[in-house]
Image (cartoon, rainbow, N blue to C red):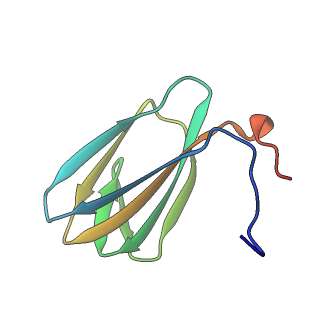
């Protein structure tokens, strides 16, 4: 697409719509990190309360737990460690 950044990497993107108290988990493989963006609502991400518009980067915990505090839309990017990313 015109104006888009092209990343030659094995990035994975996940989206979840969470209701209050609904829980999902994501397992990170070795040498992977996560970036999380909470688009709307409120959720607890691995023990940290986040509200719409908040983001968290460099999460390297093996298991990431996401719990809705109210209706929440969450995006999770599962990425190789920074040293492995090539942007063209």
Above or below 22: residue 41: below
23 or 9: nearer the eye?
9
Q: Residue at x 70, y 41 (%)?
A: 9
Q: Residue at x 39, y 76 (%)?
A: 52
Left or right: residue 42 compared with residue 11: left
Left or right: residue 77 compared with residue 7: left
The answer to which quarter of the image holds residue 32 is: top right
Q: Residue at x 19, y 71 (%)?
A: 70
The answer to which quarter of the image holds residue 26 is: top left
Left or right: residue 1 compared with residue 34: right
Residue 86 x %, y %: 82, 44
Above or below 3: residue 23: above
Residue 33 x %, y %: 57, 39
Residue 84 x %, y %: 76, 34
Above or below 75: residue 31: above
67 or 18: nearer the eye?
18
């Amino acid at each position: 697409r015109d104006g888009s950044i092209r990343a030659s990497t094995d990035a994975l993107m996940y989206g979840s719509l969470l209701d209050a108290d609904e829980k999902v988990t994501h397992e990170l493989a070795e040498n992977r990190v996560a970036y999380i963006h909470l688009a709307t609502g409120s959720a607890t991400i691995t023990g940290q309360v986040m509200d719409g518009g908040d983001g968290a980067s460099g999460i390297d915990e093996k298991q990431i737990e996401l719990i809705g505090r109210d209706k929440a839309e969450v995006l999770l990017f599962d990425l190789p460690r920074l040293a492995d990313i090539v942007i063209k």
